[in-house]
Image: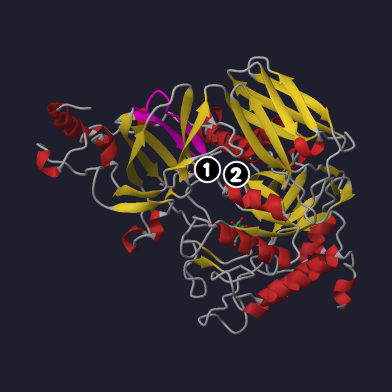
């Protein structure tokens, strides 16, 4: 820890060093430092943490993280913040939802808590942060451990050789400033929450460690062969067992890596029968279990197939947003979200526009909903910036590593509504290639834009995708509804199209209009026209209208919006349904029953 004079020196230097952040932006906590979680035990570090917003990054400039814990009277020098005392906030939380004065705060904030630890021989300890928006710098006992970029994926920091016996002090400096070079960049149509908004924990493992484990049905194996791959440290072999299938196999590891094909005939996972198996993997002294479903998802030409059967995606888009907790989700929240989707007749949800909490995906696995998972390569990303590309690539790899054993995840989406520039094409083509290399068992998509001049689906990225997502708002942003059939007629895509977004705003609060734009009836009429147009197009293999619930976004300040996007089929209270909910439900129920043509007659 720092001597008295150095502290004063720091304070002085802090006034003149505008490059103060560089030593703390190594982004060394990334997909390469992940460990395979499965059902590992975790020691929760959630709860009250000392907290301080730090608009001017004074904490990094003055090195608050290096201060000694001391009682105020024992401090001999003036200080601007003492991380060992003062205000606390609950973790996980979004600071905007805790105090009016923090609602629009964008900047850095400090979280500090003690960690009492007693080292055990032969054990390793990792800090796991479920997610922190956006840049999270980690300090332990005054030392910089590293930082993580990306607000929606988990990261790990090994603490084995850093934690001392007894009391340790853990500090996180989280910065949510919107910038051009981040992913997403500074302009989005969702609220820029900030903070440590998912769980934080310590994970203890043996010295031998399973870093990664992926098991799936081997494509083109006629559902009769599983492929499993293991990455482990400190072991020459790994063992995989699936008791319910009578499977117990050993994998040879070379340089810590190995994979094996296993003959098996599992019951296939599908939304109406989400069968999961207990799968156990061990390597050396490490042993982890996971619950895994087996299914295949493919596209052939314009057709989508789940387990070899034609598939039409009856979906809805959802944000991770709650009008009281912001991005902090609860189990009840998720169960209500999926109950509403199921009641609407959905077999599919688009988790927009960033990786949602892992529990959202686990629950979709358990209750049977296919998932479109996405990284926030949203609108005008700084595509020519290598640092931005590295960040996006890392977020994609972290997402895939976290969720690729989830049978429900059918689609990796590499972005949303990006102008078709050369830099963007190279950037997103690279992401699609990374996703394929990392996971050859899923479909790659992106939400693309329609070429409104040529009235055509025309996006060069489509050639690198399995599914072309199309966001179109005919009847809302684009008045002339007659264009939609023309666009669709002009476009003869050679692969499935999913209408990844469509819809209209409807303010059903007492401030809302009784008719016209923003009214409930107007929204309903848009849905009726959309469904009537889309239902007969053989290359449209699904839709995920925008959006299940109204959600917070500062971009919208109109009298019928008031800081919310009101395109939900259910209001922000997550209870009050709009007429469009029933309209989409009746369509989906007919699609499910294979009676699409009936729809009009009903
Ligand atoms: C876009 C975008 C969404 C946005 C929606 C809207 O398509 O992808 O994030 O919220 O349109 O305008 O409501």
In the picture provided, is 324 more to the left or to the right than 393? left
Q: Is mark 1 within 8 Å of ligand 1?
A: no
Q: Looking at the picture, how far across and down is residue 191, in whole percent?
A: 48, 57
Provide the residue span drawn in magenta. Answer: 144-164
Q: Could you tell me if residue 439 is visible in this image?
A: no
In the picture provided, is 510 more to the left or to the right than 482? left
- Residue that appears at 70% across and 21% down: 258
Q: Looking at the picture, how far across and down is residue 441, in whole percent?
A: 76, 37
| In the depicted structure, whether residue 502 falls above or below residue 360 | below
Mark 1 and mark 2 lie on one chain; the one further toward the N terminus is 1
Q: Which residue is mark 2?
A: 375
**Does the segment drawn in magenta span residue 63?**
no
**Does the segment drawn in magenta span residue 155?**
yes
In the picture provided, is 560 more to the left or to the right than 545? left
Q: Looking at the picture, how far across and down is residue 260, in whole percent?
A: 77, 24
Q: Which residue is mark 1?
A: 183
Which of pointers 1 and 2 indicates the residue nearer the eye? 2
């Amino acid at each position: 820890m720092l001597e008295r004079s150095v502290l004063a020196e720091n304070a002085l230097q802090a006034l003149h060093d505008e490059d103060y952040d560089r030593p703390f932006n190594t982004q060394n906590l990334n997909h390469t430092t992940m460990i395979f979680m499965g059902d590992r035990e975790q020691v929760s570090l959630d709860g009250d943490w000392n907290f301080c917003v730090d608009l001017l990054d004074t904490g990094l400039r003055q090195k608050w993280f290096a201060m000694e814990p001391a009682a105020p009277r024992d401090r001999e020098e003036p200080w601007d913040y003492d991380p060992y005392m003062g205000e606390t906030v609950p973790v996980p939380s979004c600071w905007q939802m805790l105090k009016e004065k923090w609602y629009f705060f964008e900047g850095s904030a400090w979280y500090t808590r003690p960690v009492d630890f007693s080292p055990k021989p032969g054990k390793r300890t990792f800090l796991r942060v479920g997610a922190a928006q956006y840049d999270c710098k980690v300090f332990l006992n005054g030392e910089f451990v590293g930082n993580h970029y990306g607000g929606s994926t988990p990261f790990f920091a090994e603490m084995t050789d850093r934690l001392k016996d007894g009391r340790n002090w853990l500090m996180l400096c989280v910065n949510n400033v919107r910038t051009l070079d981040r992913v997403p960049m500074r302009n989005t149509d969702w609220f820029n929450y900030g903070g440590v908004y998912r769980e934080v924990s310590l994970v203890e493992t043996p010295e031998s460690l399973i870093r990664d484990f992926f098991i799936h049905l081997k494509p083109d194996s006629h559902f009769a062969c599983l492929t499993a791959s293991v990455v482990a440290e400190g072991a020459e072999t790994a063992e995989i067992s699936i008791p319910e299938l009578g499977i117990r196999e050993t994998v040879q590891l070379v340089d810590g890596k190995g994979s094996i094909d296993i003959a098996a005939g599992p019951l296939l996972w599908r939304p109406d029968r989400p069968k999961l198996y207990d799968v156990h993997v061990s390597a050396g002294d490490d042993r982890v279990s996971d619950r895994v479903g087996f299914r295949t998802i493919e596209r052939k030409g314009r057709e989508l197939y789940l387990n070899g059967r034609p598939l039409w995606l009856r979906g809805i888009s959802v944000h991770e947003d709650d009008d009281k907790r912001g991005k902090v989700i609860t189990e009840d929240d998720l169960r209500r979200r999926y109950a509403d989707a199921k009641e609407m007749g959905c077999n599919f949800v688009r988790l927009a526009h960033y990786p949602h909490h892992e529990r959202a995906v686990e629950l979709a696995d358990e209750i049977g909903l296919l998932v479109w998972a996405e990284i926030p390569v949203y609108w005008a990303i700084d595509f020519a910036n290598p640092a931005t590309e590295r960040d996006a690539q890392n977020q994609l790899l972290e997402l895939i590593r976290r969720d690729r054993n989830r049978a429900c995840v059918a689609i990796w989406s590499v972005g949303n509504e990006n102008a078709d520039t050369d830099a963007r094409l190279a950037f997103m083509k690279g992401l699609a290639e990374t996703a394929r290399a990392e996971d050859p068992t899923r479909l790659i998509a992106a939400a693309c834009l329609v070429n409104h001049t040529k009235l055509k689906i025309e996006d060069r990225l489509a050639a690198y995708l399995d599914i072309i997502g199309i966001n179109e708002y005919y009847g809302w942003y684009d008045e002339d509804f007659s264009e939609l059939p023309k666009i669709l007629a002009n476009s003869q895509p050679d692969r499935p199209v999913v209408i990844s977004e469509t819809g209209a705003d409807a303010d059903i609060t007492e401030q809302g209009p009784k008719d016209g734009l923003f009214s409930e009836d107007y929204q309903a009429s848009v849905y009726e026209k959309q469904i009537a147009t889309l239902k007969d197009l053989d290359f449209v293999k699904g839709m995920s209208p925008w959006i299940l619930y109204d959600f917070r976004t500062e971009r919208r300040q109109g009298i019928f919006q008031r800081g919310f996007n009101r395109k939900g089929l259910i209001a922000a209270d997550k209870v009050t349904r709009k007429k469009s909910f029933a309209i989409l439900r009746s369509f989906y129920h007919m699609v499910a029953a294979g009676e699409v043509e009936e729809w009009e007659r009903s």
